[in-house]
Amino acid sequence: MKQKREESGLSLRAVGELVGRHHSVVGKLEQDRRKIEMLEFIAYCQAVGADPHEGLDLLLQQSHRQ
């Protein structure tokens, strides 16, 4: 998530404003220190210009490895 945000040129604060969350919450989501709800995930993806389907596919791939 962080890589995609950085590629989009957005700061934590900017994404936080776009998704209606405090920037510290966005940071915790990126660091996997807080679980993300599906609607939050979709909003995050839209804010950074990412395809939510692609992100979900990556998450599913990671869950199969564990």
Image (spheres, grey):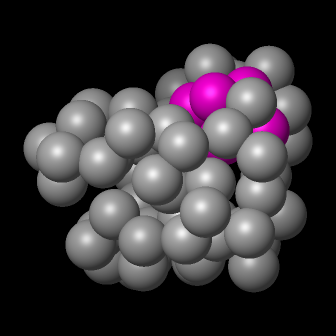
* Residue 38, placed above or below residue 10: below
Q: Nearer the viewer, residue 22 or 41?
A: 22
Residue 40 position by quadrant: bottom right
Q: Main secondary structure of the magenta part?
A: helix
Confirm whether residue 35 shows in the render: yes
Q: Is residue 3 magenta?
A: no
Residue 51 position by quadrant: bottom left
Residue at image x 42%, y 71%? 47
Residue 46 is situated, as x and y percent measured from the top left of the image, at: 42, 79
In the rendered view of the protein, which quadrant contains the C terminus?
Answer: top right
Residue 36 is situated, as x and y percent measured from the top left of the image, at: 79, 52
Residue 7 position by quadrant: top left
Q: Nearer the viewer, residue 20 or 52?
A: 20
Q: Is residue 40 left or right of residue 27?
A: right
* Residue 7, placed above or below residue 41: above
Residue 18 is situated, as x and y percent measured from the top left of the image, at: 55, 71
Q: Is residue 29 magenta?
A: yes
* Residue 35, placed above or below residue 65: below
In the rendered view of the protein, which quadrant contains the N terminus?
Answer: top left
Q: Is residue 36 left or right of residue 50?
A: right
Q: Nearer the viewer, residue 23 or 6?
A: 23
* Residue 41, placed above or below residue 30: below
- Residue range in magenta is 25-30
Q: Nearer the viewer, residue 14 or 34?
A: 14
Q: Is residue 4 left or right of residue 11?
A: left
Residue 44 is situated, as x and y percent measured from the top left of the image, at: 54, 65
Confirm whether residue 56 shows in the render: no
Residue at image x 77%, y 57%? 21
Residue at image x 18%, y 53%? 8
Q: Is residue 2 left or right of residue 38?
A: left
